[in-house]
Image (cartoon, grey):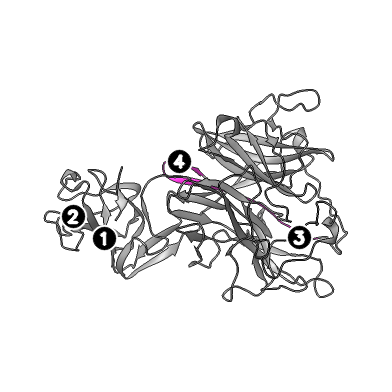
Amino acid sequence: MLFDDNRLLFFDRQHIESTENVTLTLNPPPKCGPCLHIEKEWELGGVRPLSIISWEGAYRFYYKVTLDEDHICLAMASSTNGVGWERPELGVVPFNGSTANNLVDIGDNKPNEVCVFVDPVASDEHRFKAVGHSQQEGGMYLMTSPDGLRFKRHDGHLLQFIVDCHNSSFYDPRIGKYVIYFRGWSRTRPIPPIPGSRVVLRAETDDLFHPIPYDENAADPWPVSPKWSDIVDGGLRRMNREVPTVLSCDEEDPPQASFYQPAAVQYLPDTYFAFPSLYYSFPWPPEGKFINDGILDLQFAASRDGINWRRDFRGSYVRLDLPDGACTKMMHMLTGMAPTAYRISQYYVGGGRTHGEGRVDKDTKVHRPTRMGAAIVHRIEQRMDGFVSADSSYTGGTLLTMPFVLGSDELRINVDTSASGTARAALLDEGGSAIPGYGLEDSDCIQGNDTQYVLAWRGESGLSDLVSKPIRLLLQSRNTKVFAVYPGDGGRAR
């Protein structure tokens, strides 16, 4: 979980009583370009970015490195601000006779993708967890580590299914369970010639050291894949209804669209964000050029419980680049964020080729050599809590919040009026009556751009007489973006 407090965000209307001439608006973040490039010899065999975590005051970015056909490692870069990244010499895995590198040991395992996360309730021995998968290794499995540098795989599998692509795994303290979001395949929305389409599934468990329960009698199962029929007893197949589908395209999306991977995070105790890749599939040969081909960009979804997801903003969260850009055809968001005081860094991988470019049949293997200086991962920069804002019109609008309990002797908001906008604030009691001394006529003019703007009335910001009491905030503004309200320590939604 990124933040453990009770800030009020406006990606839905849960904290909004009423609005007039105010629109909820998705705010796509600016692109900041690559933040890590291939610079080391051990990266030339191929890299795959994975996930970002926070640990002991710094950020870690994990990515997979293929040393040779028989040896796969993870690698770790570190950063204090999420912007500049360094490769620490970890002294763990030898490469060409030296351990002076940033390689992370995962033994003999060969996962396709891995999601590394810090488990806040685990023993020190298993503090770091990595949920990986590989068809060659029989499905999804768990690795753990005391330091995030030396991982050991645990016996058995979490799920013996084909669950290719990045997963998003974390411990959810709200429900006291581990949650994994991963790719499934729905058979109810086919995209020919495939008799199905990609969706996001959700599994939960209170014990990652045992197989994850699923509905063994689920209707309409996929057949066993001929390619993986002998890997495990009974063979491997895709997942359909064995666990719940939580994100999928619908009638408002193009019929060629599906969701490739989730990039889901728990942002607050009651707030979950996902940044799935929307995959627009091209026709297969002979109508199209290649099999399993298409383009992908990044979308936005939000939830209050991690199960029921809203896609109120159907526009792209991050759009594909212009022809001279690096990511003109594909984008995949990574799991994890790096917040600082004013901004949040997010990370994605992408490229200038389509998904199936070069694949003329199922047996075609397209080799794309890795070169020094190539980008490993790209960064985007979102405003703190800036994903969605409540925007008043140029001529003016109002927003009234639901009641919340004030937990500090100051009330702060995340606001941007720019130059042509202004705002004033009033505090109302739980029943909606004005609190004397805190009316719109008493409010100092709000003008500026700040993630922690302190509200004041007749020059005074102190609210000690209202601490622990339920109040409402009324904002009257023009051309103003309001991103969040911060009730303060101990403050909570009513």
Q: Residues within 10 Å of mark 4 (few under 14, many from 20)?
A: few
Name which of mark 2 and mark 1 comes first in the sequence: 2
Q: Which amino acid is tagged 2? A: Ser
Q: Which mark is residue 77?
A: none
Q: Nearer the viewer, residue 319 or 152?
A: 152
- Mark 2–mark 3 CB contact (< 8 Å): no
Q: Residues within 10 Å of mark 3 (few under 14, many from 20)?
A: many
* Residue 390 position within the rendered picture, expressed as x and y whole percent measured from the top left: 37, 62
Image mark count: 4
Q: Which mark is residue 475?
A: 1
How far, Cα to Cα, is label 2 from label 1?
10 Å
- Residue at left offset 43%, top offset 53%: 270
How far, Cα to Cα, is label 2 from label 3?
62 Å
Q: Which mark is residue 237?
A: 3
* Residue 342 position within the rendered picture, expressed as x and y whole percent measured from the top left: 42, 44
Q: Regarding mark 2 in the picture, which secondary structure is present there? A: loop
Disc 4 target residue: 340
Q: For the residues carrying marks 3 and 1, which lies nearer the camera in this image?
A: 3
| Residue 351 on the magenta segment | yes
Q: Regarding mark 3 in the picture, which secondary structure is present there? A: loop
